[in-house]
Image (cartoon, rainbow, N blue to C red):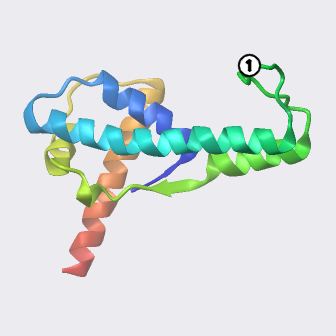
Amino acid sequence: MKIKNSELNSVITFLNGIKLIGEASIGRTKLKDGLSFLNEAYGKNQMITIDEFDEWADESKTSFKTTNDKLMKAINKLNNKEVTINIDDVLFIDELKKALQDYKGELEGENADAYAMLVLCFKGNEDKKEEVK
């Protein structure tokens, strides 16, 4: 499954917010763990990039200056970089896929976007498996 760095947090937030039971819940936790690992790396890479340009807005490094075009270009490139998680290695992923396909809750905004992204990624992955058979 490929996902942009900038989308990681919204997918993790969505997964945190849905109610699942049994093995689908375990699948969610395992997928969330993998995405969280990628999100931590993304955060570290952001900090390294800002450090390289020395464009922190404050000493506590909680915000950065957006006036440097080269920095903003590097940050945008990092935001749009696609990272990959091999969902076939995620324990109970099939149960999570089924639970999301059958999900009857109402969704809006970023949660609806994250739901659509996951379901379409899962569907695309299944289509690729069928082509190999």
Q: Residue at x 33, y 26 (%)?
A: 16
Q: Position of residue 109 (x, y in %)?
A: 47, 25
Q: Is residue 64 left or right of residue 35?
A: right
Q: Position of residue 85 (x, y in %)?
A: 39, 55
Q: Position of residue 17 (x, y in %)?
A: 32, 22
Q: Residue furthest bottom?
A: 133
From this view, report whether residue 89 is shown above or below residue 104.
Answer: below
Q: How many marks?
A: 1
User: Which one is in front, 45 or 78?
Assistant: 45
From this view, report whether residue 132 is shown above or below residue 112.
Answer: below
The kind of residue on which mark 1 rests is Ser
Quarter the C terminus occupies: bottom left
Q: Residue at x 47, y 46 (%)?
A: 38
Q: Is residue 7 left or right of residue 47?
A: left
Q: Is residue 99 left or right of residue 60?
A: left
Q: Secondary structure at mark 1?
A: loop
Q: What residue is pinned by disc 1?
A: 60
From this view, report whether residue 94 is shown above or below residue 29.
Answer: below
